[in-house]
């Protein structure tokens, strides 16, 4: 973890819910074990699988702090059962068809130790194919203003880690009234308490396969997410709603532009550093990516472009011309700029 051999390792609790995932669960379990993290609490909650999942679990029993295989009331219930058994300062869950990347827990522990004010983080979005090969990786930035504006797709659940203190403040539970978006609903409660920090490192990946629930039940997923957003909006501050309306109009007169910028943690010269990236720059970047994906003739490398845009943003000329660019955008749209009071 560090050249300092006496460094304290905070306990990380990983919950793995499972049901009939014998094609993938071995990869998922091994991705936790190969972390070689010295203070790991690994809890596996199986919903009474009828395939060979339980036989696979038994082969790794010695690595598990607790496991059970019995019928449950769904995904959220399984997670609540697991988290109720957990004791770690840092918490997360990994679905049994996804995987962590080597070194993820070390990076997570270093960040939480170095920055006591950081309460939840997410890594770069990664996607595995059915065979477990990483074939896509990109930056995805979100904050409470995105959620207020229903721009929620998607914070990668398997790359999110948080402190127990944040979990307790948010109620200390997974909302079992949600069948699919138990993660998105939890993020709405986290956003009401603290900002999300984005780690410029790969922590995990989401595996794409024929039985992904998010794909098979997309309409239900979207309905549940909108329901969670609506509940969150009833609790946000009035000034956050006002700021969201200003963002929507790309107002160049936001009084505190820094408040809406995305929070970043990056590793520079082997040291984790905090920084921020301009909200509107990210939106421009995402639009370019969206268009490039629609146009096969336009070849844009996502990660390279992201790094290039971050470099542009850090330049003095970019900061000095921010208001001018915003003004010109409004002029091109035929909108007369005015200060929003």
Image: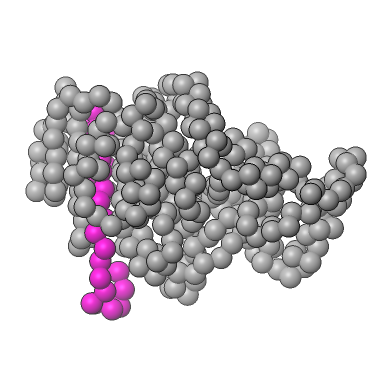
Vertical arrangement, residue 273 with respect to residue 128, above or below: below
Q: Determine whether, in the image, residue 55 is placed left or right of residue 236.
A: left
Residue sitting at x 47%, y 75% = 269
Displayed quadrant of residue 202: bottom left
Q: Which residues are magenta?
A: 1-29
Decide which of 306, 196 is in the foreground and name it: 196
Q: Is residue 241 magenta?
A: no
Q: Position of residue 18 (x, y in %)?
A: 24, 33
Residue sitting at x 69%, y 44% = 242
Q: Determine whether, in the image, residue 313 is placed left or right of residue 180.
A: right
Q: Quadrant of the N terminus?
A: bottom left
Q: How is the image coloured?
A: one colour
Residue sitting at x 19%, y 32% = 46
Whether residue 160 is visible here, answered yes or no, is: yes
Q: Position of residue 336 (x, y in %)?
A: 90, 44
Displayed quadrant of residue 53: top left
Q: Determine whether, in the image, residue 84 is placed left or right of residue 297.
A: left
Residue sitting at x 51%, y 37% = 232
Q: Is residue 5 magenta?
A: yes
Count of picture labels:
0
Q: Position of residue 203 (x, y in %)?
A: 39, 53
Q: Position of residue 257 (x, y in %)?
A: 69, 57
Decide which of 338, 239 is in the foreground and name it: 239
Displayed quadrant of residue 314: bottom right
Whether residue 153 is visible here, answered yes or no, is: no
Decide which of 200, 291 is in the foreground and name it: 200
């Amino acid at each position: 973890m560090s050249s300092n051999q006496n460094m304290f390792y905070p306990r990380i609790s990983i919950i793995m819910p499972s049901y009939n995932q014998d094609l993938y669960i071995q990869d998922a379990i091994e991705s936790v074990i190969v972390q070689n993290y010295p203070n790991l609490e690994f809890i596996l909650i199986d919903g009474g699988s009828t395939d060979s999942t339980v036989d696979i679990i038994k082969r790794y029993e010695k690595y598990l702090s607790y496991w059970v295989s019995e019928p449950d009331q769904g995904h959220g219930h399984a997670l609540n059962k697991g988290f109720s058994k957990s004791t770690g300062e840092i918490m997360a869950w990994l679905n049994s068809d996804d995987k962590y990347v080597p070194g993820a827990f070390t990076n997570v522990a270093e960040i939480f130790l170095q920055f006591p004010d950081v309460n939840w983080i997410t890594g770069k979005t990664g996607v595995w194919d059915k065979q477990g090969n990483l074939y896509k990786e990109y930056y995805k930035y979100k904050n409470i203003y995105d959620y207020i504006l229903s721009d929620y797709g998607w914070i990668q659940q398997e790359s999110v880690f948080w402190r127990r203190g944040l979990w307790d403040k948010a109620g200390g539970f997974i909302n079992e009234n949600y069948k699919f978006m138990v993660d998105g609903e939890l993020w709405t409660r986290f956003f009401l308490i603290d900002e999300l920090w984005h780690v410029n490192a790969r922590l995990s990946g989401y595996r794409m396969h024929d039985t992904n629930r998010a794909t098979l039940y997309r309409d239900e997923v979207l309905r549940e997410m909108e329901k969670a957003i609506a509940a969150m909006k009833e609790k946000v501050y009035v000034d956050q709603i006002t700021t969201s309306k200003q963002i929507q109009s790309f107002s160049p007169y936001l009084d505190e532009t820094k408040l809406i910028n995305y929070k970043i943690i990056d590793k520079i010269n082997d040291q984790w550093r905090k920084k921020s990236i301009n909200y509107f720059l990210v939106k421009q970047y995402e639009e370019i990516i969206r268009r490039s994906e629609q146009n096969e003739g336009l070849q844009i490398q996502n990660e390279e472009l992201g790094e290039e845009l971050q470099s542009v943003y850090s330049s003095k000329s970019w900061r000095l011309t921010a208001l001018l660019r915003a003004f010109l955008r409004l002029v091109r749209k035929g909108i007369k700029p005015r200060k929003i009071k």
